[in-house]
């Protein structure tokens, strides 16, 4: 879209091939606003672009950092969950404990169910994800850069 606007501005400002500027009579007409010609803002205003670029780059950096932290935290949680599972399974194998997996799964499903339908499914995962994004992007300038950085770090 920006490219289209830029080419529109160039074509409006370039002299037409039908216009013969042999005499100076057209100079007076150019100083007067023509009907249908709307002045356009400067598309490459450095103040606005630097502000926008600053917001996007800071947002992307923070998003990447948050995504990296989520990724590392998920690995650590998976590691410790695996260690606990192996330990409990070893104790159950030796006959020291009896594990009621049905009860554990029921309790976990109740804790993770967000929409109240009694089961944990993709709808609940979307609710958890949207809540996480709401928390992470709350009151943040440059949220689109943040989301780009977050998705890049998680991919």
Image (cartoon, helix red, strand yellow):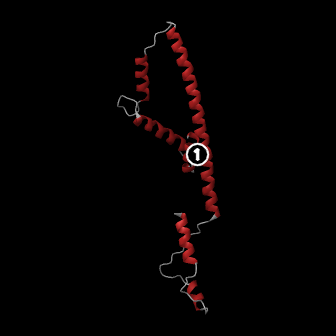
Q: Is residue 123 above or below residue 49?
A: above
x, y percent for residue 146: 57, 47
Q: Residue at x 60, y 33 (%)?
A: 72
Image quadrant assignment for residue 102: top left
Q: Count the marks.
A: 1
Which of the 4 image quadrants contains residue 17? bottom right
Work out which residue is located at the far top of the displayed protein and give it.
95
> In the rendered image, is residue 125 in sight?
yes
* Residue 40 visible in rendering: no
Q: Position of residue 141 (x, y in %)?
A: 57, 50
Considering only vertical position in the picture, is 153 above or below 102?
Answer: below
- In the drawing, does residue 122 fall left or right of residue 73? left
Q: Quadrant of the C terminus?
A: top right
Structural crowding at the residue carrying mark 1, measured as other residues with C-alpha within 10 Å and reported as few (<14), some (14–19) or many (≥20): many
Label 1: state its secondary structure.
Answer: helix
Left or right of 114, for residue 27: right
The residue where tag 1 is placed is 149
Pick out the residue farthest to the left: 117
Q: Residue at x 54, y 50 (%)?
A: 144
- Toward which corner of the image does residue 26 lie, by quadrant? bottom right
Which x, y percent locates residue 137? Answer: 53, 44
Q: Is residue 72 above or below residue 2?
A: above
Q: Report the front residue among 54 and 9.
A: 9
Q: Position of residue 64 (x, y in %)?
A: 60, 43
């Amino acid at each position: 879209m920006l490219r289209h606007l830029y080419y529109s501005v160039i074509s409006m400002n370039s002299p037409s091939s039908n216009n013969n500027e042999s005499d100076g009579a057209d100079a007076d007409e150019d100083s007067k606003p023509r009907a249908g010609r709307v002045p356009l803002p400067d598309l490459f205003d450095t103040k606005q672009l630097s502000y926008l670029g600053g917001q996007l780059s800071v947002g992307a950096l923070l998003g990447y950092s948050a995504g990296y932290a989520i990724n590392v935290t998920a690995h650590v949680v998976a590691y410790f969950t695996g260690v606990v599972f192996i330990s409990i399974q070893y104790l159950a194998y030796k006959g020291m404990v009896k594990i009621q997996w049905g009860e554990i799964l029921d309790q976990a499903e109740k804790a993770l169910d967000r929409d109240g339908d009694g089961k944990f499914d993709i709808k609940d995962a979307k609710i958890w994800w949207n809540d996480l994004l709401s928390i992470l992007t709350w009151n943040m300038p440059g949220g689109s850069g943040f989301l780009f950085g977050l998705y890049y770090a998680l991919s």
